[in-house]
Image (cartoon, rainbow, N blue to C red):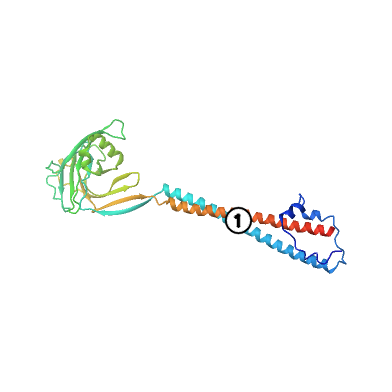
Amino acid sequence: MLGKDTSYQVFDDDDDYEQNILPPDLFGDPTDELEDFEEPNENGSPDDYFREGNQSMRFSKTCLKNFFTVLLIFVYLLLTTVAAFLAYQTITDFMDKLNHPVMSVTYKEVVQFSPPGIALYPGKAKLLSCNHYYHGNIPPLVNPGTPQKGDCVIEEVSYIGPFTNQTEKKALVIRGPSDVRSKELVFLQFSHNETDEDFSAITYMLFAKFSDLVDSSNTSEFMRNCERNYSMWTFSGGFRTWVKMSLVKTSSDTFDDIEFRQESAVVKFNDNRPDDEKGNELFFAVFEWRDPFQQERRLIVTANAWSSIAILCGVFMALFKAANFAKLTVQWIIRMRKRHLRNKVKKLHQITA
């Protein structure tokens, strides 16, 4: 029969006792060690019932602690997963912003532009006149189809086209307008005496500065590069094509680029010449700046390496904390199991004593 002071005995948690008392296979199933003992009969003492109630209460607390421990482990695993996803998303967003910079657009007002170069490819057409006018007032045509005196600066350049196989091209390069406030414009008149073509047009190209061609040591190579980098447009015969130009500058950390944009309007030419002169087709073109605003675009990389590194540091700290908590939780569970098994062994020794 058990003594009354058995259930109130204070158990020692010293490691020396654990090493001396616990058997080597202590972390097996403790119920295996209790199979050899008989269950108490129904006529047990009141102390037996008190001890059974105390053990039941201790078992309930242990189950509750284990439940909350598993719940905390699950929560920290969830937080770890979220932290890992955040790290992946941060790296992905950084690489995406690094490869796709945004564009900042500003407009700079100028009094005048640098005179652009207007490269025309007339083919068999002939330049009849080229004049500079102001205020958008073009005087009425006098003897259209006949050569007239002009005041334009013109350069003639021959070169091998960059996209053709050894085909020589001839370009008439005209100094464009510069005074945007006074609405300076250039009026061009061509004639084409070929009548066996179904359609006829003159191709032209715009580049940033006429002075670049004049100052170039190799004008042929300069025109090849311009044709490679700039767009080509056309204007048709029998009409007056009014071209309004605008300049766009694009810059970034690695390159600078200049391009022209244009708005064109077409007006029909009322040909009042005699019938025998109408076989000589006429071309008219007007080049003018659209407005005094120069568009400047800059490519900006919005990816901030320092902010991304700060986020990743926070994520890795959270991962470290989660791993540390998991380690401490496992150690605590092992400790609690050792204590539980040690108490079981003490009770078994007291029962057998």
Tag 1: residue type? Answer: Phe
Quadrant of the rendered image containing residue 144: top left
* Dot 1 crowding, Cα within 10 Å, few <14, some 14–19, many 20+: some
Q: Secondary structure at mark 1?
A: helix
Residue 169 at least partly seen: no
Residue 8 to residue 236: above or below: below
Q: Is residue 29 left or right of residue 40?
A: left
Q: Position of residue 109 (x, y in %)?
A: 24, 54
**Residue toward you, 346 or 166:** 346
Q: Is residue 136 left or right of residue 15?
A: left
The number of callouts visible is 1
Quadrant of the rendered image containing residue 348: bottom right
**Residue toward you, 315 or 103:** 315
Quadrant of the rendered image containing residue 167: top left
Residue 299 at least partly seen: yes
Instruction: Determine the residue located farthest toward the bottom in the rendered image.
Output: 46
Instruction: Determine the residue located farthest toward the front in the rendered image.
Output: 16
Q: Quadrant of the C terminus?
A: bottom right
**Residue toward you, 52 or 300:** 52
Q: Position of residue 261 (x, y in %)?
A: 28, 48
Q: Quadrant of the N terminus?
A: bottom right
**Residue toward you, 14 or 187:** 14
Residue 68 to residue 276: above or below: below
Which residue carries the number 1 mark? 325
